Amino acid sequence: MDRRTFLATTAMSGSMVLGANDRIRLGLIGSGGRGRLLADEFKQAGAEVAAVCDVYEPNLEAGLKAAAPGAKRYDSYKRLLEDKSIDAVIIATPDHWHAQMTVDAAEAGKDAYVEKPMAHTIADGFRMIEATRRTRRVVQVGTQRRTYDVFQEARRIFESGATGDIRLVNGWWLNHQPGLRKASLQGKLDWDQWLGPAPKRPLDPVRFFNWYYFWDYSGGLMVGQAAHVIDAIHWFMNSTWPAAVTCAGGRVNLEGAEVPETTSMLIEYPENYLAVFTVGYKAMRYNGFNDQMKQFHGSKARFDVGREGYALYPQSNEIEMKSSVKLAKPGSFAAATGAHIRNFLDCMRSRKDPNATVEMGQSTNVVLCLAMDALRAGRRLQYDAARRAVKQV
């Protein structure tokens, strides 16, 4: 059977697997900074980045330089998906495009590695699940902590029951953002295609270069950082859907932005615990080792899980608490993305579920979407998981 026939058959049945020695050919959709970093990681993992798509010409040219020699160039992701020689795609676009591109990739018989947050609306997340499962595709969400050895070790300690019952989890991510990026367009941009499903508006370089900070395309640092932290909390606590979400934000202190850089969300879970996550990007600058934390407050111990380490503090009446288990591995997190990518490539061959499935991504996405809506509405929002319905309280 030749390669093209093999891939077509795989797309239809979803039951056949790539051979262990078959080199996986990928298409990169969105070749900005994150996309190019992922392309490099995929190359190091042995895959071939054989096609690149971007609607901004300078990014497209930079992406082609990061790809394999002779990689095909596309300015339309749909034309890239028509390429039968491509096995999978990397989706590293603004958040508002993640869902449609993942669905279209699945329909085209392609597996997908999609950056976090998985989607920009609750409905879109469920569309991604339906398409993934119906077409039997492998989709990995880019929440790489699930493949990071430090977090896997921490979860094993957590599952031992050392903390006792947990009714409160506190998380935070602190650092300093001086302002929005000030840049001018240096080449051709297909603005209408970039907007895609977002509301139409005149070309705006500020929005293009700073899409992260505008509601039409993302939920800012609150969503970008919570995608990792809330996902980790769900993983450790074996949680799926929230019961309710409340969110508060300070004034917007980044001139020109819509989304505040300082926010705090409170999530209520049916498993009888609360999670509070605060993002503050007008704090002082932190080394990455110290910029984030998840504290699981148990009846027997408190478990602190940071970016690159963890510590278990058993109950104590001493003024200076001492950890019974502790690990610190500064600089180790950089390897997490590569490990996550290798897990995805392994699952492409075996057709097993990857470490960060679409269901896991949607579990977190529901929280993030509720937080965005709760902040803008100024109301507590309840979630009915059985009906997939949101109710203002």
Image (spheres, rainbow, N blue to C red):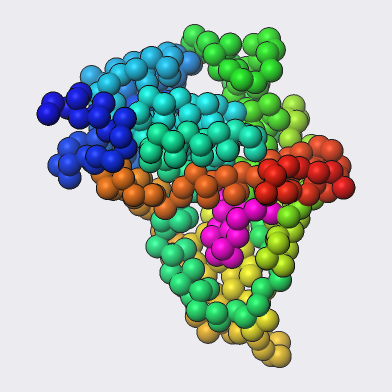
The spot of residue 258 in percent (x, y) is 75, 31
Q: Is residue 241 magenta?
A: yes
- The quarter of the picture where the N terminus appears is top left
User: Where on the picture, by quarter, is residue 164?
Assistant: bottom right
The spot of residue 153 in percent (x, y) is 43, 69
310 w.r.t. 138: above or below:
below
Q: Residue at x 20, y 30 (%)?
A: 6
Residue sitting nearer the eye, 355 or 294: 355
The residue stretch that appears in magenta: 227-242
Q: In this image, 67 relative to 296: left or right?
A: left
Q: In this image, 370 relative to 59: left or right?
A: right
Residue sitting nearer the eye, 22 or 259: 22
Q: Residue at x 43, y 43 (%)?
A: 140
Query: Is residue 98 in sight in this rendering?
Result: yes
The spot of residue 223 in percent (x, y) is 65, 43
Magenta stretch prevailing secondary structure: helix
Q: Residue at x 52, y 70 (%)?
A: 310
Q: Residue at x 26, y 44 (%)?
A: 349
Query: Is residue 284 in sight in this rendering?
Result: no
230 w.r.t. 361: above or below:
below
The spot of residue 278 in percent (x, y) is 71, 54
Which residue appears farthest toward the left when viewing the image?
Answer: 1
Q: How many marks?
A: 0
User: Where on the picture, by quarter, is residue 39?
Assistant: top left
Q: In this image, 146 relative to 25: left or right?
A: right
